[in-house]
Image (cartoon, grey):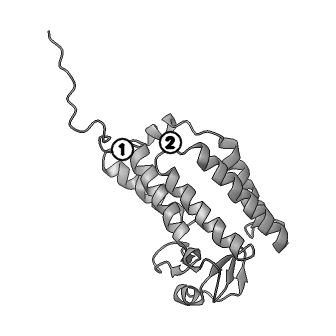
Amino acid sequence: MALALPLLLGLVLSLLLGGRLSRLAELRLRLLPVFYAGIALQIAAFPVSALPWRTPDRAAVVLWLVSYGLFVVGAAANLRVPGIYLVGAGMLSNVAAIVANGGHMPALPSALRAAGLHFTQSRNSALLAHPHLSWLVDRWAAPGWVPWGNVFSLGDVLIAAGGLVFALVATRPLPSPGRIGVVSPSREV
């Protein structure tokens, strides 16, 4: 949920700068069902407590990795959409760290301590003092004032930045770079 906050912040900032949410409806995303399938797989893998099932760890890891694969395919099909290249790079970064470390996103002990978290394994994260690809793992703690924030990785930063760019560009609060300084011809009467 914390990764959605930059997107929401971008939308609010865009509105303050004169952007219009109605412009989001003009976007034509390709392979939209792929994103829905990815979301469904993540819910199946890591159900919220209100749902009546629990998914065994190995099955959850497989579902999670397949969902990431779907999201990467969907992002690749939509690279023309502002910010999606950052989201895709962030997802690939996270998948690399997850796969290199056995199917869970490693979290450094220092990051967990700073976030006030205490676990060896929790859903899709695992405490790991010396992970492979350590620069890509959850290594920082979100500030306490961030709702639903805990620990985050370089990939999460890229995903969040992509959401912010998406919101600010897709709603067009400011003139696009191609239109800055362009004067429309006046009509003679």
Quarter of the image with the N terminus is: bottom right
Quarter of the image with the C terminus is: top left
Residue position marked by numbered label 2 in the rendering: 80
Q: Nearer the viewer, mark 2 or mark 1?
A: 2
Name the disc covering residue 151, or none: none
- Vertical position of residue 118 compared to residue 73: above or below: below
Amino acid under disc 1: Gly
Q: CA distance from mark 2 to mark 1?
A: 20 Å
Please state if 177 lies on the left or on the right of 45 as rendered.
Answer: left
Q: Nearer the viewer, residue 145 or 156?
A: 156
Q: Answer whether residue 109 is visible to the viewer in this image.
A: yes
Q: Residues within 10 Å of mark 1 (few under 14, many from 20)?
A: many
Q: Nearer the viewer, residue 39 or 72?
A: 72
Residue occupying image coordinates x 15% and y 11%: 188
Residue position marked by numbered label 1 in the rendering: 19
> In the image as oriented, which residue stretches furthest toward the top?
189
Element type where label 2 sits in the image: loop
Tell me residue 153's x, y (percent).
55, 73
Q: Answer whether residue 51 is visible to the viewer in this image.
A: no
Please state if 111 lies on the left or on the right of 172 as rendered.
Answer: right
Amino acid under disc 2: Arg
